[in-house]
Amino acid sequence: MIDHPPSPPVLPGDRGRLLTLDALRGVAVMAILLANMPGFALPDPAYSNPRAWGGDRAIDIAVWALTEIFVNGRMRGLFSLLFGGSMLLILQRAEDAGENGATLHLRRMAVLFVLGMIHLSFIWTGDILAHYALVGTIALGFVDMSARRLLVLAVVLTGFSMALGALDCLGLFAAAARDTPQAVALWNAYQAAFGMPGPAVLMPEIIAMRGSWSDGTAFRLANNGNPLLDLISIGPETLSAMLLGMAALRSGFLTGQWSRSTYRRCAALGLGISLPAYAAMAATVMASGYDVRAVALTQLFLQAPVRLIGTIGYAALVLLLVRPGGWWTTRIAAAGRMAFTNYIATSVVMTFVSYGHGLGQFAQWHRATIYLLIPVAWALMLAWSKPWLDRFGQGPLERLWRVTARTSLSGR
């Protein structure tokens, strides 16, 4: 039997929606675009290394550094945190309605996995939904734990994630000598992911993305990562954040039931630790000349212990800023209620700008220039989400997910 958290205040006339969760989700779906823009518009290693492509100017490096310090990892962490909290809330409400919550959840994860694979294969390689579906299935085994035990397990999993990252980094450092064919292959693989592999290595991706939709799809199908392998490599980190989200819901943190002074302390501590740490790591990468070893060390190992600390800090800050009835809160919460639709819609729009089936701008712009698209995307999210919800009550993909999961559950 799932242990319910204290009953949070529910806004009248909003069908039981929790404003705090919707507002947090809205911030996450908007802010994660800051992290994802290089993935839409630039070759793959440029996501982690600004010198891989499109990062030659001082302003490009500055944009990379600001994104590293203030965004990267934390918005994905916030999404994962909210996924765990929302999962627990859906299970609780299903039980209250006399339904089999576990069966409903597994159906939802199956549908999400299919939709995520469609997104991954036919729209954009940066999909996270299929991964969330797999990790969310595993997370079901922990829903009966207390908030304290969930928190402890989240910390343990973070340590395990760091251990995996350390092994990766040790392998990379050992391969730096490039004294065997195996070492050369491993070094080149890390260069292709985190380094500066050079135009000859990057041109197949550039040509495919500037080509037709079928060219891009063929490239994605040939080069996409395996979600099952991702489950091993980044699954512990994702599960850690989901369990922390369950603990945060169960304790009342995500529902705004803590005192404002406590939220202020959480924000000050979380951001006071994470922002200087990320700044130091960005400075280390810059001082190394953007060496692949420095980039991999920060991405795979050093960021892990402060990523969730920063995520909690941002969550506390957003909860402090939530104002029921305020224009910004209402609009951002509406974008959050349609986070699934807005996430996929962002991929569709940004890949249309970048890929050959649309405007064909892939790898044509500098890193800083691509960020000019973000205010436009944010304005569209804020402009359309609330009117759509006022008319239809639910985002189109949210409705598809819900109806498909419940139809398969009922057997019709």
Image (cartoon, helix red, strand yellow):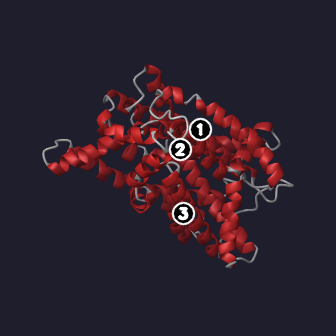
Nearer-the-camera pick, 227 or 151: 227
- Estimate the spatial distance between the alpha carbons at disc 1 and disc 3, rounded to whole Å: 37 Å
Amino acid bearing label 3: Phe
**Label 1 or label 2, whichever comes before in sequence order:** 2
> What residue is disc 3 on?
113
Contact between marks 1 and 3 (CB within 8 A): the answer is: no
397 relative to 365 in the view: left or right:
right
Mark 2 or mark 3, whichever is nearer to me? 3
Pointer 2: residues within 10 angstroms few (<14), some, or many (20+)? many
Find the residue positioned furthest to the left.
179
Find the residue positioned furthest to the top.
58
Q: Going 50% across and 35% down the picture, which residue do you hit?
A: 360
| Marker disc for residue 268 | 1
Amino acid bearing label 2: Arg
Kindly indicate the quadrant of the structure image that contains residue 111. bottom right
Pointer 1: residues within 10 angstroms few (<14), some, or many (20+)? some
